[in-house]
Amino acid sequence: MAETERIKLPSGGWVEVKKWLSRGDRKQLNRLQRQWLRVQDNVSTDELAANPNIAVTVDTSKVDPDAIDDLTMALAIVAWSFKWPVTVEALDALDDRDIMAITARTHELYLTPAEKEVLGLKKD
């Protein structure tokens, strides 16, 4: 079982999150983030794999911070003080102050500096 950390929430509740994401969790986040990437024109997938220096940019018009937060919280939360299961719909029903506390900590635990920059968050 993954090591966890308990986050106390402003509403008086709590959530337990994984201290580290699994490889499978990271792969799910990467799949979501790939939707935002734009590769230099006329570059094949094979060329990109062979040459990581080919220009890849982030299409900021496609970046969806809520989607990444929803997926991150759904993957990270292993237990909580609420009576219903952890789902995106359940997260949407939480007090916004609780969501802000959860996302602040999960950003610290999981996001790379590059991901923080794309999402417009403070760099480490």
Image (cartoon, rainbow, N blue to C red):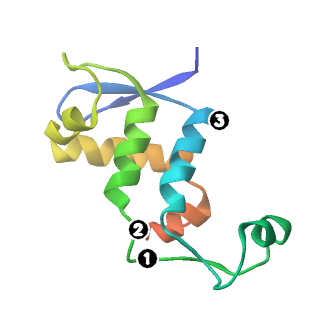
Quadrant hosting residue 64: bottom left
Dot 3: what SS? helix
Q: Amino acid at mark 1?
A: Thr
Classify 94 as above or below 124.
Answer: above
Classify residue 56 as left or right of residue 108.
Answer: right
Mark 3 = which residue? 23
Viewer-nearest residue: 112 or 51: 51
Q: Are marks 1 and 2 in contact (CB under 8 Å)?
A: yes
Q: Amino acid at mark 3?
A: Arg
Q: Position of residue 102 (x, y in %)?
A: 35, 41
Q: Position of residue 30 (x, y in %)?
A: 56, 51
Residue at figure coordinates x 45%, y 34% from the top left = 75
Q: In this rendering, does residue 21 appear at all?
A: no
Does label 1 or label 3 sit earlier along the sequence?
A: 3
Classify 100 as above or below 3.
Answer: below
Mark 2 = which residue? 63
Dot 2: what SS? loop
Classify 9 as above or below 108.
Answer: above
Q: Amino acid at mark 2?
A: Val
Quadrant hosting residue 15: top left
Classify residue 49 as left or right of residue 12.
Answer: right
Label 3, residues with CA under 10 Å away: few <14, some 14-19, many ≥20? few
